[in-house]
Amino acid sequence: MRPLNEIGAAVVGTGFIGVVHVEALRRLGVQVHGVVGSSHDRAAARSRELGLPPAYESFDAMLADPRVDVVHVTSPNHLHHQHAGAALRAHKHVVCEKPLAMTSAESADLLHLAEQSGLVHAVNFNLRFYPLSQHVHGLIREGGLGEVRLVSGQYLQDWLLLDTDWNWRLEPKLGGELRAVADIGSHWMDLTTFLVGKRITEVMADLATFIKTRFEPAGPVETFATERAAKSMAREIKTEDTATILLRYEDGTRGALTVSQISPGRKNSLRYEIDGSSAAAAWDSERPDELWIGHRGRTNEVLLRDPAILNAEGRRATGLPGGHAEGYADTFKALYAAVYRAVAEGKPGTAYPTFADGHDEMLVCEAVARSSRERRWVEVARAVRARAR
């Protein structure tokens, strides 16, 4: 098994999330040999900021570097299929941001290519790797909540609240048909699917675009940026600001999700509550070290993250002692620890979300879009049963 410091990585994309990937890899001891961006000047500037080696001249130059074992794809959504596919064909292991592709046809193609390659392939559903969510996964699997009946929650943000807020995700040709659902709702749906061990089978969705005209600035805008450009152009918006979605999971479990990128004061609020026949569990990403556990006949509990009292799954995702808060950036480190163990062993593993999970989420998102258009329940179109989680 190879030591992590002998495994080389490179990152495609130099925006907010690309930087998070780089920093998590460094914390693991993985060698980041460089980045490539939308322009060489942009990538070179980011490399200097991060103290990385000089940026690659091109994506092809990065693929040609024999030191690079793993490629992290953090480019805009419309490039995921191209970049991930090329990396696999160059015999590189791949970690791809979500959504895996723009359509289920593209994600199916990537899944087939990845499985035929024998290489490690992962989708960056990092939110599974909060220690308390890992603990909940183990708790549910062991019957700690009884029979799961209801899953409810939200994923709310406010970074696109104003008509002057702009990002490439607003453009369907770059981000895809869905925006809020694909960007953050997919995280919640993947996370709850992982937690309860049941896939989503049917959806009833209501999508709404409240800000129908936005003002695009003259130059590029960083994700979550608050600066306003002096010059801008009015643009019609067709992607959704909000979504309310009813869900049916396998075996009859029901779900309800609210998604929004225009909720004032909500910076990154993912919440879920899972109600079982004997107990309930609720968690909030803005208070990540606290897990509420509900009971009928005795006092409710608040479990504070502490590796000494978590189950084995929770402990594996924990890097700090109790009382030392673990948050968003730590989930990337925990995810990549699982991915890079598989890379070190030279074969795909099962302890992280793969392209199969990314493809399944594409199918769910397409059902959401169709449900909203047709104003009815829509079944998730799966040709074959996915592997057990």
Image (cartoon, rainbow, N blue to C red):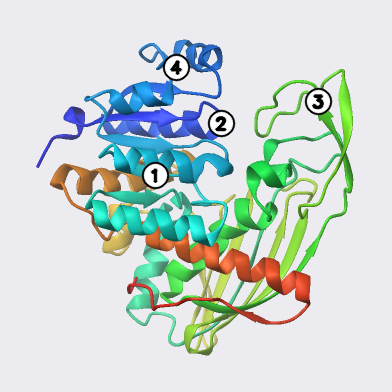
At mark 2, the secondary structure is: helix
* Labels 1, 4: front one: 1
Point out the tag, 1 or 3, that comes first from the N-terminus: 1
Residue placed at 18% from the left, 51% from the top?
A: 347
Residue type highlighted by circle 4: Leu
Q: Which amino acid type is marked by label 2?
A: Phe
User: How many callouts does the rendering have?
Assistant: 4
Q: Nearer the viewer, mark 1 or mark 3?
A: 1
Residue 299, image x and y in percent? 52, 78
Q: Report how far apart the C-alphas of labels 2 and 4 lie in the structure.
A: 12 Å
Q: Is residue 92 left or right of residue 164?
A: left
Q: Amino acid at mark 3?
A: Pro
* Residue that label 3 marks: 217
Asked which secondary structure carries label 3, the reply is strand
The mark lying in front, picked from 3 and 4, is: 3
Separation (CA) of disc 2 from disc 1:
23 Å
Instruction: Please identify the quadrant where the C terminus is shown.
Output: bottom left
Q: How far separated are the C-alphas under marks 1 and 4? A: 27 Å
User: Regarding mark 1 in the picture, which secondary structure is present there?
Assistant: helix
Q: Residue 16 got which mark?
A: 2
Q: Earlier in the sequence, mark 2 or mark 4?
A: 2
Q: Which residue is mark 4?
A: 50
Q: Which residue is mark 1?
A: 85
